[in-house]
Image: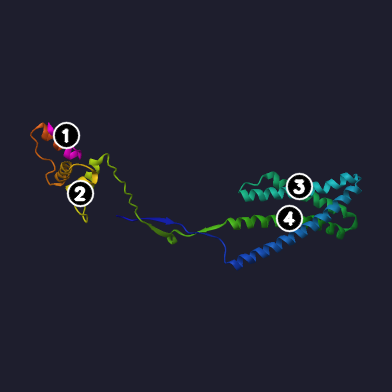
Amino acid sequence: MRRRKSVVPVVEVAGENGTARLGDRVILGIAVAVLLGVAAAAAYVSYHHFYALAIDLGERHDMAVLYPAMSDGVIVMASLVMVYCSRRKLHVPVLAWVALAGGGVVTLIANVANGWGGGTGSRLLSALAPVAFVGAYELLMWLVRTSRKAADKVMVAPADDHVCHPVEPVTVSVPVLPVDRFEAARLTYEESLQPGNKRVGRRALANRWGIEIREAEEIIADVDRERSPSAMPTVSGTADLETAVAAVNGSRPTDTEARA
């Protein structure tokens, strides 16, 4: 029998040994901490520059507090939408890019305008806060996106390196259940004729299944006739025909049929 083989591809998670992965985690953790600190400091400075500009332009205090929150909030929301699309492998909407660019430009203009009266140095110093905030926050989002992609990356071995596991053929044996004691006796006798088994006699067969010795002899004769080279005997009458058909079908003729 030809043996079938199933090919199982070897799938490994991308990455090196445990020391390298631990080093990557440490670097990532330090980078995230630094970026969070820079983004928080830049957001604080940018917020107060924007707030001071709004006060100088005559806005009320409660209104001036909200302007920098709206500008920086648009930047944060646009970046989060980009990260979400990257994680879900979706196309980044144009509105997210427009909102990110618009929020960054508005924040930059507001900070530069706040330091405009102090000369070139003051203008450059005021522009540093929004640039640092946007840059640090976008770098943080880039780390989130790339770390997610690295975790999901897998390496599949080439087809030549696949491991073949032989599959052994499985043979299922379905037992044949006899319909009555005569059929059970017939199956018992047929099984005793298999190589390596001891041939059962008529008396043992009759005692085992509670039939008469005469009935056991008939069963043995039927099986022997089927196994003989001439399985189909010559019949000349109706009674002989019924006996031959019974022998071929493996059924036992009734007493009425036998007397007939």
Say which of 237 and 111 sits in front. 237
Left or right of 142? Residue 121 is right
Residue type beneath disc 2: Ala
Q: What range of the chain is rendered magenta?
A: 245-260
Q: Position of residue 90 (x, y in %)?
A: 62, 47
Left or right of 172? Residue 54 is right
Residue for badge 2: 204
Residue for badge 1: 255
Residue for badge 3: 74
**In the image, which is nearer the foreground, mark 1 or mark 3?**
1
Q: Secondary structure at mark 1?
A: helix
Identify the residue at image location x=79%, y=57%.
40
Q: Secondary structure at mark 2?
A: helix
User: Which of the numbered marks, if any, corresponds to residue 137?
Assistant: 4
Residue type beneath disc 3: Val
Residue type beneath disc 1: Asp
Looking at the image, which residue sits at the far left? 236
Say which of 111 and 81 sits in front. 81
Q: Is residue 249 magenta?
A: yes
Looking at the image, which residue sits at the far bottom? 19
User: Tags 1 and 3 in contact by the CB under 8 Å rule?
Assistant: no
**In the image, which is nearer the foreground, mark 2 or mark 3?**
2
**In the image, which is nearer the foreground, mark 1 or mark 4?**
1
**Counting residues from the N terminus, which is met first, the one under dot 2 or under dot 3?**
3
Residue type beneath disc 4: Tyr
